[in-house]
Image: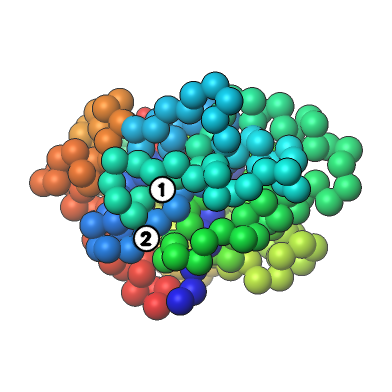
Amino acid sequence: MQTHTIAIANEKGGVGKTVTVINLAAALNRLNRKVLVVDMDPQANATKGLGVSVEAGQPNIYGLLSDPDAADAHQAIVSTAWEGLDVIPSHTDLSGAEVELTNEHGRENRLKEALADLPDAYDVVLIDTPPSLSLLTVNVFTYARFVLVPCQTHPYAYGALQALFDTIGAVKDAINPDITVLGILATFYDHRTRVARSILDRLKNEAAYRDLLFKTVIRTNTAIAESADKGRPVVFYRRSSFGAIDYTQFAEEMMARLD
Ligand SMILES: Nc1ncnc2c1ncn2[C@@H]1O[C@H](COP(=O)(O)OP(=O)(O)OP(=O)(O)O)[C@@H](O)[C@H]1O
Ligand SMILES: [Mg+2]
């Protein structure tokens, strides 16, 4: 069985990366897929959103990156309340890894080395990334086979897409020839606003994006923000909400694209 490694990335902040990681993981869990979430954002929002808190001294992603030889990925895996949905948690110390790794040889390979002997029981590994092109994100792009790009249906987010695609292209040329954009997921959609409709139309029509755009669109939904606060994905927390419906449909569409 093959494990699909998928980075969820967009250098633009607040476009729905973490919410997508959390709820895609939950929706895949409900489809009986085994999922590991790797939280590579020092903000640790994916960790918290899955109801996991990291105690002092507990292994986490920072330990794996700072000393991949000594650290053991298996020990850093934490179970969530949902069987078959695990997480390698983040920690605020991760924000220091950027500086510490800057002068180290092979610094972009740390995550790949650390996760080299992950249990192959996982169907999907989802990696959350910070909102910047940092060394942390480059580590994720060195490891992952696919990049899933959430794009807020807003002009700023649309305008930032080209820079992200350029970055992924540069990583492909220099470091990871296998990396591929899996697709673009439109988020924060509200059909009542002209600007959201207009950006969705541009995603559907622009030659560079239309074949990548997923048919499923994630609607703006307040239950999503509430669920993050409760540490429960909306897919589990409120099954009849737009958020749960949209992410479940998206999980099915994404797996069809992968299989
Ligand atoms: N579809 C949605 N409807 C309503 N609120 C949403 C939706 N998606 C995300 N949010 C809320 O918007 C905020 C930003 O979302 P999220 O944290 O997923 O973005 P992000 O891209 O991970 O941000 P960052 O770049 O800071 O990591 C959060 O408060 C989240 O709860
Ligand atoms: Mg985030």
Can I make out residue 197 in this image?
Answer: no
Quadrant of the image occupied by residue 171: bottom right
Tag of residue 133: none
Relative to 61, is 207 on the left or the right?
A: left
Quarter holding the C terminus? bottom left
Give the amino acid type for the residue marked by disc 1 in the picture: Asp
Residue at x-position 44% and y-position 62%: 122
Residue at x-position 23% and y-position 41%: 234
Label 2 sits on a secondary structure element that is loop
Label 1 sits on a secondary structure element that is strand
Quarter holding the N terminus? bottom left
Identify which residue, 4 or 173, lies in the foreground. 4
* Image quarter for ligand 1: top left
Colour scheme employed for the rendering of this structure: rainbow
Q: Which residue is mark 2?
A: 34
Q: Which residue is mark 1?
A: 86
Give the amino acid type for the residue marked by disc 2 in the picture: Lys
Quadrant of the image occupied by residue 46: top left
* Residue 71 in picture, x, y percent from top left: 67, 43
Q: Is residue 95 above or below residue 60?
A: above
| Residue count near mark 1 (Cα–Cα under 10 Å), binned few <14, some 14–19, many ≥20 | many
* Residue 78 in picture, x, y percent from top left: 44, 41
Identify which residue, 259 or 203, lies in the foreground. 259
* Residue 54 in picture, x, y percent from top left: 48, 28
Residue at x-position 83% and y-position 37%: 102
Relative to 219, is 166 on the left or the right?
A: right
